[in-house]
Amino acid sequence: AHYTTGLGLASPGGIASLIADKYHIPTYFNNFASGGSNLELHIKGNSIYTYALWMFQQAGLTNGLSAVIWQQGEANSFDSLNASIGYDTIFTHLCNDWKADYPNLKHVYMFQTHPGCGYNFQNVLRNTQRRCAEHVPFLSVISTTGIVAHDGCHYGQAGYYNMGAWLCPQIGRDLCRSADTLNINSPNIIAAKFDDNAHTILTLQFDVPVILQPDTTSPYGILSVKDFFYLGDDKAGCSVSSASVDTAKHTVTLILKQSSKDSTISYTPNNTYTNLPVQINFEGPYIFSTRGIAALTFFKFPISKNLITTAVKPANLHKGNFQFVMPHTGQALVELYTINGARVALLYRGFAQTGTHALSVDLKKLRSSRYYVVKIKIDGVSIVKPLMVVR
């Protein structure tokens, strides 16, 4: 097989052709990839960033950049700190620098690295990438699990076409005013809780409807998605006896082999199968959305007694209206902030029942930016969600 760099995304039949064919908009791609580079080499002040900015300035196109497609990470997975706090902090600064130097940049699309791409802390890095959108409201993270034709890090032509097919609807939503917005994101876990006092039934909740890929047959036996959930520090993946899905409720339910006192759950191994006698890069089975888009992997996601996570629906703010969801009855505080951390408005404070609550914002007060952050505190537990204003 022949595997290439990220330029394959823009090749004929790739994302550029998909955009032109579907939305009838001409596209222009610049590829500033650098093989094997870590994130630090891409920050402002270093040669890759400086050269790219110079090229756009010379062409008079700094106001013409609409989106950045980001596929990188393996070189940052060699230690846990570099793959977690360090990566998150640096990438957030990089996105803010892009926004400053390319004033009309509307969105950044990050591909979460694939299992088998990197070093000893791939799972930590992937989880950090999954959470980067919590700090960058104009960022979308897209899974690469389930992508075909790859060697772990690099992809053949069919793989890049696959990535382009998952990316294209999001570009259509963010840049082309496409009405096709239903369940086009990679499913992302939003909550995990035990459903019984014995802690033998664990429910995982996702932000969109999900399905489980059927068991597959390998030369070494049956491969089942249930074997690739890991409780606590378990690395063997032998804690789950069965897994089922409720697509309507966006949930996956795991039946455990015995009672568990663990407080975290992970999905997919670090790199290779953990239940085979040979080392082979992990290839599923996976969790998918009903649109056939693979779920983001997660590492040591906290298991809660209650669903303490809430959701903002929709993620875009249309005509000043949006909703937030209370997973259980309690005290709620909802505030709106700029991406620089300045509070714009207090939206809600008080007791709220379980369910969906509608809020409104005066768009006349939101002239400074398209991007904001909603901070929601429920019974003392805070979460942050990005919000984009659509006028």
Image (cartoon, grey):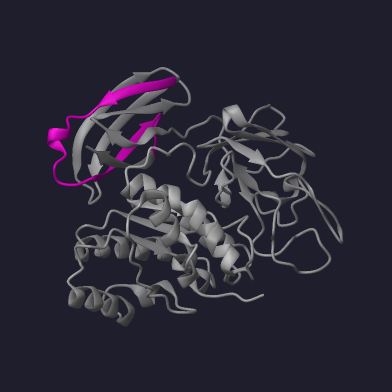
In the rendered structure, which segment of residues is drawn in magenta? 355-382
**Quadrant placement of the N terminus:** bottom right
Quarter of the image for residue 359 reads: top left
Does residue 280 appear to the left or right of 219 in the view shown? left
Measuring from the top left, give residue 221's x and y in whole percent. 87, 55
Measuring from the top left, give residue 75's x and y in whole percent. 50, 74
Q: Residue at x 70, y 54 (%)?
A: 284
Q: Is residue 43 visible?
A: yes
Q: Residue furthest bottom?
A: 47
Nearest to the observer: residue 21 or residue 60: 21
Magenta span contains residue 282: no
Against 91, residue 377 (above or below) is: above
Nearest to the observer: residue 195 or residue 146: 146
Magenta span contains residue 358: yes
Nearest to the observer: residue 104 or residue 141: 104
Quarter of the image for residue 320 reads: top left
Q: Is residue 134 visible?
A: no
Measuring from the top left, give residue 220's x and y in whole percent. 87, 60
Measuring from the top left, give residue 244's x and y in whole percent. 71, 35
**Quadrant placement of the C terminus:** top left
Against 384, residue 237 (above or below) is: below
> Count of labels shown?
0
Does residue 330 appear to the left or right of 279 in the view shown? left
Q: Residue at x 65, y 28 (%)?
A: 195
Q: Residue at x 54, y 73 (%)?
A: 78
Does residue 128 appear to the left or right of 241 in the view shown? left
